[in-house]
Image: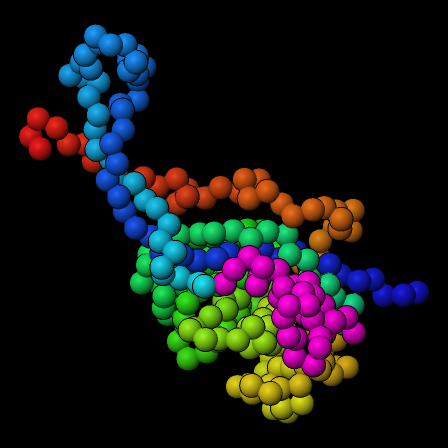
Amino acid sequence: MTDPTYTINVIVHRLFGTRYEVVEVLPDRDPPNLFHPVQVLPQHLRFRRQLQLFTDYEHGTTRSEENIRALFTRNPAYRYPEDKTLNDIYEPAGIQFRLVGVLDQTIESHLADFALQSQLRSIARRFHQPDAINVYLIREIPGAFGTAQLYSPHVPASGYLFLADREGTPFSRSHVTLVHELGHVLGLPHMPSPENLMHTWSSDRTLRLEPPQIPILRHHASLLAADPLFAEVPLIDPGLLIPRREDFREWEFDIDLDEV
């Protein structure tokens, strides 16, 4: 009997900074007919000023959606190390990764540019989506191009990784880092041989898995695998994802315009 192929859903989060702007809004009540030529806006319906949060694309990841999708599906415009895509490399283990969503998330601008390990864990808990590996794209992390958290069904918000895209990081480097960190998520430790995918700190590591690594990968993949009945579902609508309380935060204040 042929071993099944495990399909694992992946959700990519692009992390950006935040900026704040003061905007003028009407109070939450029936607005007057602003087109009436003689109507005067009553005192209680005057505009108020509200502090609103916006995404600051000057801080955080620089990866485009096309670049992200190319990490999972071959794009002839990109060069792949050893001419192997992510799923080509994991094919001997019977594992396929399926990108099901790319989400833009806002965090504090200084964290979007550089975050410590403890801060990375906090970010992962905040934006985690279940039943998938969560990949977070950030500008820089301490001393590495990537870091990962092993998946365990007994640990909430586990099974994630961070990819850093420092200025000038080539696509091939990000691709190798993603493949390596996914191995950590699925239970593989570092290996001493530069001929192995899981070798530490090697920029020219061979994208090869050894036979003893495959049962480990398949065990963890079986815990994360998507339901085969939904294997052909198209990319999800971000609006269908579980909303987080933080997504609805609002900072506001009212100013009496008579005093301004």
Q: Is 63 on the left or on the right of 258, as rendered?
A: right
Task: Tell which of 229 and 165 is nearer to you.
Answer: 165
Work out which residue is located at the far top of the displayed protein and give it. 38
Q: Which residues are magenta?
A: 63-92
Q: Position of residue 3 (x, y in %)?
A: 85, 65
In this view, 237 is above or below 38: below
Q: From the image, which quarter does the C terminus lie in? A: top left
Q: Quadrant of residue 110?
A: bottom left
In this view, 219 is above or below 209: above
Q: Quadrant of residue 43?
A: top left
- Residue 158: tell me if it is visible: no
What residue do we see at 39% from left, 45% from top?
246
In this view, 259 is above or below 223: above
Q: Quadrant of residue 65?
A: bottom right
Task: Tell which of 181 and 154 is nearer to you.
Answer: 181
Q: Position of residue 46 (x, y in %)?
A: 19, 21
Count of numbered badges drawn on the protein: 0
What residue do we see at 50% from left, 63% from top?
63
Q: Is residue 69 magenta?
A: yes
Q: Position of residue 49 (x, y in %)?
A: 21, 33
Task: Tell which of 181 and 36 is nearer to you.
Answer: 36
